[in-house]
Image (spheres, rainbow, N blue to C red):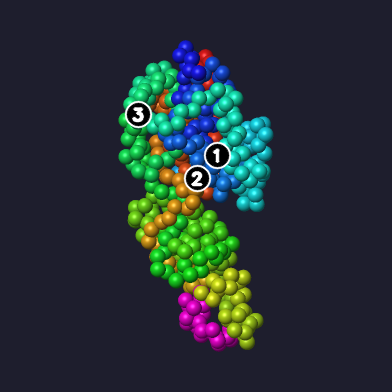
Amino acid sequence: MENKNRDKLVVIGGGAAGFFCAVNAARMNPDLDVVILEKSDKLLSKVKISGGGRCNVTHACTSIADMASRYPRGNKFAKKTFHHFFVQDTTEWFAARGVVLKTESDGRMFPDTDSSQTIIDCLLHEASRYHVRIQMKSEVKKISGEKGAFTLTLQSGDTISATYVCVTCGGYPKSQMFDWIRDTGHHVEEPVPSLFTFNIPKHSITELMGLSVAEAEVKITGSKLKQSGPLLITHWGLSGPAVLKLSAWGARLLAAVQWHFTVMVNWMPAYNEETLRAEWQQIRMRYAGQMIQHKNPFGLPARLWHFLLHEAGIGESCRWADLPAKGQNRLAKCLCAYEMNVRGKTTYKEEFVTAGGVSLSEIAHDTMESKKVKGLYFAGEILDIDGITGGFNFQNAWTTAYIAAESIAKKDSR
């Protein structure tokens, strides 16, 4: 029940950052009336589907500098915020509420139940415990006023008053969707997609769909952008961590060229064309009498090896001893510098995020309060901060939301 004599915090957005801000502010200051406004009929929807339904809560990282380096945009700001609330704080916060996080070999951290519902239930329980009210199908179209006297206008035409407002509605894919935030006087960095896969239409490599390479290097030709990691071939092109990381670091560059560019793949990054050529003689002597088709000395998946031999024009009956110089050079290029033309992008399941958002120069890193409008706070992906895949975007949500909650709770208790 709303108490009109209590100061009110209205949190706009029922996602990870929204819930984390709301439940922590309500816990730290019981005198605060806290309400979450969610525009849809679903709560914590991204938490639900994250990590294939397991929820990649954060990433095991003990170094703030190392963690901050995983954010293509906003890394300097993130580095400052992590001094207030970091990975260990996240794990301890959930552990104190009976949710144990486990670390996988690549550093990703999940609830030990392997179910995102565990995280959802925890946050919903905290909301109930601290009497956070939740209002669904309540899309905010306008924020007016300032600290102590905010008025929020909903799409329905209804209005809600608030002492404090925290905007945690996530990123928007289209620039005009930020207009209601621009109307508060804030600058918005233009949104572009991040964490997407590469479409390579009508290329024969898609015949290898489902095949993965444990370690490959992918480079965008004509730039310095390159990333290494697992690479997956799909029915539309290329995916996997190497591609997703590359799409994040190249988000603005790739948007500028309408996602039409060329990638160069090194299927075995322990070599480059030059170092491989230096070893050809030894390889040829070692396997001289064997068919190249049947003897792959590099540990590549057989289907990929056969595909690259075909691309290099090397026949099925060719022996290592008989490999001509031109064929040798073509094969070296296919193995270490295989070029493909990318023509578009595809959303990668639930990992897709938007680069861009509220300009960080207008936000105080130690409170998450706007420098332009007192009493107005921002947290999560609505800010111009985005990380690569692996739990980094959730950690930014927990961190910024916690800082905002703490700031609001302290201000209101003075």
Residue ID for mark 1 = 395
Q: Nearer the viewer, residue 65 or 138?
A: 138
What type of secondary structure mainly makes up the magenta span? helix
Amino acid identity at mark 1: Gln
Mark 2 or mark 1, earlier in chain: 2
Is 396 drawn above or below residue 214 in the view shown?
Answer: above
Mark 1 burial class by Cα count in 10 Å: few <14, some 14-19, many 20+: many
Q: Are marks 1 and 3 in contact (CB under 8 Å)?
A: no
Residue 245 versus residue 161: which sits nearer the camera? 161
Distance between the alpha carbons at the discs numbered 1 and 3: 33 Å
Local SS, label 3: loop
Q: Residue 105 lies in magenta, yes or no?
A: no
Q: Is 38 situated above or below 145?
A: below
What amino acid is at disc 3? Answer: Ser
Answer yes or no: is residue 68 visible: no
Q: Which residue is mark 2?
A: 387
**Residue depicted at x 47% and y 81%:** 313
Residue under the image location 45 percent in, 31 percent down: 136
Position of residue 110 in the picture relative to residue 141 (left or right) = right
The residue that disc 3 covers is 156
Residue 328 seen in render: yes
